[in-house]
Image (spheres, rainbow, N blue to C red):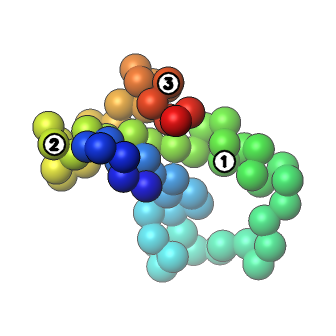
Amino acid sequence: MVLDHWRAVCPWPGPSWTEGGNWPKELFAADLDRLEASGWELYDIDADPAETHNLATIEPERLRI
């Protein structure tokens, strides 16, 4: 998701379908809770177009938008 110049990314369980390996056939509430609690990354794509600096821990309010 891109909002303004911020991009939120949830790479769980891996950065891509292939690299994720054993994707579950179904996601359950516990999976979604775990994902929501720790699975998000945040990037300022104007300042960091290569998405190398995850800002989720220092900008948690932006993830809630």
Q: Is residue 57 left or right of residue 4?
A: right
Disc 2 marks a residue whose amino acid type is: Asp
Is residue 65 visible from the viewing direction of this image?
yes
Quadrant of the rendered structure where residue 62 is?
top left
User: Between marks 2 and 1, how big is the CA–CA gap?
Assistant: 26 Å
Mark positioned earlier in the residue sequence (2 or 3): 2
Q: Regarding mark 2 in the picture, which secondary structure is present there?
A: loop
In-front residue for pair 45/54: 45
* Element on which disc 1 rests: helix
Q: Residue 24: where, in percent of width, then height?
A: 73, 72
Q: Residue at x 41, y 24 (%)?
A: 59
Q: Which residue is mark 2?
A: 46
Q: First in sequence: mark 1 or mark 3? A: 1
Q: Residue furthest right?
A: 29
**Which residue matches tag 1?**
35
Q: Residue furthest top?
A: 58
Q: Can you tell which quarter of the image residue 44 is in?
A: top left
Residue plotted at (76% across, 44% down): 33
Q: Which residue is mark 3?
A: 61
